[in-house]
Structures are given as structure tokens and as C-alpha cells.
């Protein structure tokens, strides 16, 4: 039902389809009229009769795509793409695969889409960063979500909080006839109370706004006296007829109402509505001077875009403006909401996301690229209708993710306290900044939070949760890896310096010479001192990727020969295992203990303590360089 958020004559149909042949004529007409439930039944009859081909498979995929049944959509798209399809089919197939968490398969379909649409913004996004998914999954959590009791088994979405009243759109009115798109009742605007941080589980219809047509969602001026909302253009007698003149097709348009005696009255359409295109999902800026909305009007970059229009002092409107490529794509952008701090929240399926529609934030004062809000706001399904009330410090999200009561459900989103961590990596000896250092951030439960690379200024930025301690593993070629701790912080900005010591290993033609690697008496486990030295060996082996090492471990002559041989062999094996644990391939290093059989100083049992120490050593012989 989120599709009504965009348009009644939804643009995913792209253009009116002509029946491929007499067998598909009935189904195609239903598809043209956006009656996807009934169209699906007719196409399925053809598959049962053995009359289906790739065209029918594609149409079935599109039907299920339009009602967001990702399982069935994937099934039919998989059959459709056994023969060449248009670029958009591969894109929609990829979206459904992502919705079903089949990310590798989705990437393969996106590559096919990219080959057919190389100039598409969605292709450029893919080519710019093929690892975006791991970055999204590693983002710090910005909100905690809670389900709400007022959700029904029907579609509920577009919650908006104003003066302790939550307005939202819902298809729960079963007394109304069903909408042919998805076989649910038409939408009405409902409202419920929000008091003392609690959402009332009961809701009532906003009778002064509802009609026999689709309505919702809404936005209200700061003074509470002006309301804008979406409604079908039939109310304003704006529609077009199908080619056979048998069906009237309306649009979603924006209407304005004013408050009198606690009732919404004087309902009129805005001047930039049209029967030729949709205007919906209005959101008014806090100063009342700008109205943001969704439209597919001329000048739209994709299917539907985010637009804005000036609201003049006399109540008239300026010329609508497209928000441009930092917000809009060739895909769908919808459910625009402008917060009091001028951050625009909107949903998109054309940007780098987790699947379906994802929610993004765009700072309208800076005009930078929009930012994906990450999990749990976004999921593999459709996530949209995000609104943020700064004075109450709460947000609402609409989603059709699993676990909800109905098709679309509304969730309460509570901001999570975060720390903006700024790490600068330096050379410990020279103080110079180090670019291309790898920083792995691990939380208290040893979960990897993010993997980052320092920029040309030696800096990485990361947003982490408050009141949690973290460890930062910092590594760079030519330097000894080190671990830095970040104590619990209550929020704000935190700067941390990570100083790495350069490797001081000596590399000759025959061996890599390190400082003494000390073991505890009668033990073979690697000590902290030993690890620091072995990190130098790891750095050298990373510097020489073809190098193969043979590690030799020796003891002094004190003690039993057999005991010394076993002890040195255990130490050699521990040394090898440590190096492998740091990412060196097992085929590149081996080791063996030699006990007291190869003394560096042949002094028997008459050695001085210094000579004993010289014999008690590790050697790293270069087998291949």
C-alpha cells in the first residue's frame, strides 16, 4: 500500500502495455489498470495451461514486485531473465533478491543492469563502490525501533506527530470497497494520542478529512492552523481515461485545509496539481516557506522524485524545483519529510541500499550526497515514511519488514546516543601522518563494528554508540600492528591518536633478523614482547609477498637434550601459528625446534649468562625472497 504514497496510476508500469497476443489480452488490461491481484490470477492461468512464455514470466514478476511479494517476484523474474530483458527488469530482479538477502545474486543482476544502462545513476553508484553493502552493515546504529499497538492487519504508514497527536494513513476501514491494486480497502487518515512518551493503542478516523477516495499522509504548519495532505485527484474531478474509455485513472494530488473550531475545513487543491502527473507526500518546513513533495512531473529524473516549492506570504506557490542528483535517481524517491533542523528524510530504491526502499538523510543546507541511515531503520524490505519530531526527540518509520502485523506497519524510532570518533594515525618516530592504515573497530563483545582505511591526512571517522568501550586494531605495511582502547564516552566528539612504530627488522640475503624473542621459563606461548617482534616479521613478509620463511628455535645447553628439543619445537610451532594468525598464508612459513644442537657460541656447560642468552634464540631463514 506504500505505492499509494507515490501515485494512484503508479509509474512502475512505465508505459501502457499492449497485449502481446490474444492469450494475454485479459491479463494485460488488468495490468494496465494497476489491478495487480487480478492480473496475477490471469497470468497464472496461462502458466497452468502451458501457454506462458518469458513475457508472461516478466509480467508476473512485475505484478508481485508492485505489491512487494519478494519471494514470488524473485521466482518469476528468474524465469523471465533466461532470455534477454530490458534493463529495468534486471534492476527490479536485483531489488527482490536483496529483499530476500541474496546479495551475491543481486550483484550479478545489477551487473547485467549496468551493462544495459551504463549512464544510469544507479550504475554509477554501483561502480563507485562495490563494497558499499559491508559498509552499510557496519554503520553505527542511529535508532532503536519499537512496534506500535495501533497497527492493524492492513497497511498503516506515514505517521506524523503534531501537538501530541499522531496522524497516519491506514487501509483498516473494511466498510470501504477494496482497491484493485492490492485487494486492500482504500486509505483514510487516522489519528491517535501521544502523551508522556507513550503512544495510545487506540486510533480514530479524521472524519473531517476523509472521503470515498484515498487520503494521507499529512503535514501541518508550525502554528497548527494549516494542513496539507495527499488525496486522489478524482475529488477535484481530475482524471484521464484509458484507451477503451472504460476506466478513469486518477492521480495522487496535494490538498490544503485550514483549521476552524478544531475542524479541518476549506479543503482546496494546490495550484501545481495536474491530471497529467502526481503530487503527493507533502512536508512543510518549520518556517512555512517551503513545501517538499513527491512527483513524477516533467523534469523528474527517474520514476518519482523529491521536489520543493516556495510558499508565498499570500498563500500562493512559486515554481516547483527538482532537488537534483544528490537526492534523486532514475529509480523511485518518495515519502519526503523535512525536519526542523533542515534535514530532509526520504526513501529511495535507486541509491546504495540494503534492499527495497531505504531511508536516507539529506542536509539541505550543505547539498552533500544523501546518507543511508543503516540498520535497523533500513532492512532488506521496503522502509519509508520516516518522520522526525525534534522537540519530542522521537521518529516514526513505516516498513513492510517481517514481524509486523500487516502489509505496512509503523514503528517508533528512538535516537541512539552516538560518539563521533576521529582517529589520526601517525608514525611514532617521525610524527608524520600515515595514510592507508587499516583500522578495525571491535566492541565489548568482540564483534567487528567497522573496517576503515585512513585517508591522506591519516584520519578515519566513525560513529559509535555511547557508553560502550571499544578496541581499535591498527595495521599498516612497514609498521608494527598495535591495539588502542577507547573508553566509554557519553556522546559528542572524541579524538584519538594511534601512533605506530616502524618495523626495525634487518633483512639480509639469508635471514630476517629481529630482536630476541623471549619466552617465559618452561613455556612456549607467545608473550607480548614476542608478539611485538613477530609483528615486524609479519610486516616484512607483507612487504615481500613472495617471501617464504623457515623459523628455527634454539635453547641453551642447560637441561636434558630431549626436553630442550621438545621445548624448542613447541616454541617454533607457536611462532609459526602466531604469524599465520596475522594473515600470512600457511604455505609461506614453517618452523622446527633444534634444541641445543646448533649453539651460536659453542661453550658447552661453561657458558657465561650472556653466552647462554645468545644460544637461546629464534632465527628466521629466508627460503625464498
Image (cartoon, rainbow, N blue to C red):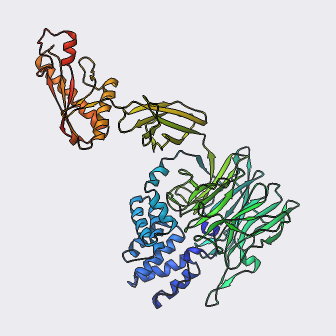
Residue 20: x and y in percent read 47, 87
- Where residue 252 sits, quadrant-wise, is bottom right
State which quarter of the image contains the C terminus.
Answer: top left
- In the rendered picture of this protein, how many numbered marks are placed on residues? 0
- Where residue 47 sits, quadrant-wise, is bottom left
**Residue reaching furthest to the right:** 261
- Image point (59%, 49%), residue name: 145
Q: Is residue 494 above or below residue 242?
A: above
Q: Is residue 451 visible?
A: no
- Image point (11%, 18%), residue name: 561
| Pick the front one: 206 or 491 | 491
Residue 588: x and y in percent read 22, 40
Residue 531: x and y in percent read 32, 28
Q: Is residue 259 visible?
A: yes
Q: Is residue 153 above or below residue 115?
A: above
Residue 383: x and y in percent read 57, 58
| Pick the front one: 257 or 40 | 257
State which quarter of the image contains the N terminus.
Answer: bottom right
Q: Is residue 601 above or below residue 538?
A: above
- Where residue 610 sits, quadrant-wise, is top left
In the visual, does 361 lie left or right of 340? left
Amino acid at each position: 500500500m506504500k505505492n499509494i504514497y507515490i501515485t494512484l496510476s503508479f509509474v512502475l508500469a512505465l508505459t501502457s502495455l499492449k497485449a502481446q497476443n490474444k492469450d494475454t489480452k485479459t491479463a494485460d488490461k488488468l495490468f494496465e489498470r494497476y489491478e495487480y491481484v487480478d492480473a496475477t490470477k490471469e497470468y497464472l492461468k496461462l502458466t497452468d495451461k502451458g501457454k506462458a512464455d518469458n513475457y508472461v514470466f516478466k509480467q508476473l514478476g512485475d505484478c508481485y514486485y508492485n505489491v512487494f511479494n519478494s519471494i514470488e517476484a524473485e521466482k518469476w523474474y528468474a524465469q523471465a531473465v533466461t532470455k534477454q530483458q530490458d534493463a529495468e527488469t534486471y534492476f527490479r530482479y536485483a531489488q527482490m533478491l536483496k529483499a530476500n538477502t541474496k546479495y551475491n545474486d543481486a550483484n550479478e543482476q545489477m551487473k547485467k543492469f549496468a551493462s544495459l544502462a551504463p549512464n544510469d545513476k544507479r550504475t554509477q553508484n554501483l561502480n563507485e563502490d562495490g563494497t558499499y553493502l559491508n559498509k552499510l552493515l557496519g554503520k553505527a546504529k542511529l535508532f532503536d525501533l519499537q512496534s506500535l499497538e495501533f497497527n492493524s492487519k492492513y497497511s498503516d504508514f506515514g505517521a506524523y506527530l503534531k501537538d501530541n497527536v499522531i496522524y497516519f494513513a491506514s487501509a483498516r476501514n473494511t466498510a470501504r470497497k477494496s482497491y484493485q491494486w492490492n485487494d486492500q480497502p482504500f486509505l483514510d487518515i487516522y489519528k491517535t494520542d501521544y502523551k508522556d512518551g507513550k503512544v495510545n493503542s487506540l486510533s480514530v478516523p479524521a472524519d473531517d478529512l476523509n472521503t470515498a477516495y484515498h487520503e494521507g499522509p499529512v503535514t501541518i504548519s508550525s502554528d497548527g492552523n494549516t494542513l496539507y495532505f495527499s488525496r486522489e485527484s478524482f475529488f477535484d474531478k481530475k482524471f484521464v481515461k484509458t484507451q477503451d474509455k472504460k476506466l478513469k485513472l486518477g492521480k495522487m494530488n496535494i490538498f490544503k485545509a485550514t483549521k476552524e473550531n478544531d475542524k479541518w475545513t476549506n479543503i482546496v487543491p494546490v495550484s501545481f496539481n495536474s491530471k497529467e502527473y502526481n503530487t503527493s507526500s507533502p512536508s512543510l518546513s518549520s518556517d512555512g516557506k517551503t513545501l517538499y513533495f513527491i512527483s513524477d512531473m516533467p523534469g523528474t529524473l527517474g520514476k518519482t522524485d523529491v521536489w520543493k516549492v516556495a510558499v508565498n506570504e499570500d498563500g500562493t506557490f512559486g515554481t516547483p524545483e527538482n532537488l537534483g542528483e544528490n537526492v534523486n535517481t532514475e529509480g523511485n524517491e518518495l515519502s519526503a519529510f523535512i525536519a526542523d533542523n533542515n534535514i530532509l528524510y526520504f526513501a529511495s530504491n535507486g541509491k546504495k541500499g540494503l534492499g527495497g526502499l531505504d531511508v536516507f538523510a539529506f542536509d539541505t543546507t550543505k547539498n552533500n550526497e544523501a546518507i543511508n541511515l543503516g540498520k535497523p531503520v533500513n532492512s532488506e524490505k521496503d522502509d519509508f515514511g520516516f518522520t522526525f519530531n525534534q522537540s519530542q526527540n522521537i521518529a516514526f518509520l513505516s516498513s513492510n519488514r517481517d514481524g509486523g502485523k500487516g502489509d505496512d506497519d509503523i514503528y517508533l524510532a528512538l535516537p541512539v546516543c552516538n560518539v563521533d570518533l576521529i582517529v589520526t594515525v601517525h608514525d611514532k618516530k617521525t610524527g608524520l601522518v600515515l595514510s592507508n592504515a587499516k583500522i578495525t573497530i571491535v566492541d565489548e563483545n568482540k564483534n567487528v563494528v567497522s573496517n576503515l582505511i585512513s585517508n591522506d591526512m591519516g584520519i578515519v571517522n566513525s560513529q559509535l554508540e555511547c557508553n560502550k568501550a571499544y578496541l581499535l586494531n591498527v595495521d599498516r605495511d612497514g609498521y608494527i600492528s598495535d591495539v588502542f582502547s577507547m573508553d566509554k564516552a557519553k556522546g559528542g566528539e572524541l579524538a584519538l591518536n594511534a601512533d605506530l612504530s616502524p618495523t626495525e627488522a634487518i633483512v639480509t640475503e639469508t635471514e630476517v633478523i629481529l630482536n630476541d624473542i623471549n619466552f617465559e621459563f618452561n613455556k612456549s606461548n607467545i608473550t607480548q614482547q614476542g608478539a611485538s617482534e613477530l609483528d615486524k616479521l609479519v610486516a616484512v613478509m607483507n612487504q615481500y609477498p613472495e617471501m617464504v620463511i623457515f623459523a628455527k628455535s634454539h635453547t641453551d645447553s642447560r637441561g636434558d637434550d630431549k626436553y630442550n628439543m621438545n621445548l624448542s619445537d613447541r616454541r617454533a610451532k607457536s611462532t609459526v601459528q602466531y604469524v599465520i594468525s596475522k594473515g600470512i598464508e600457511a604455505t609461506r612459513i614453517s618452523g622446527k625446534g633444534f634444541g641445543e644442537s646448533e649453539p651460536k657460541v659453542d661453550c658447552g656447560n661453561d657458558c657465561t649468562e650472556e653466552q647462554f642468552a645468545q644460544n637461546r634464540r629464534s632465527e628466521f631463514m629466508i627460503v625464498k625472497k
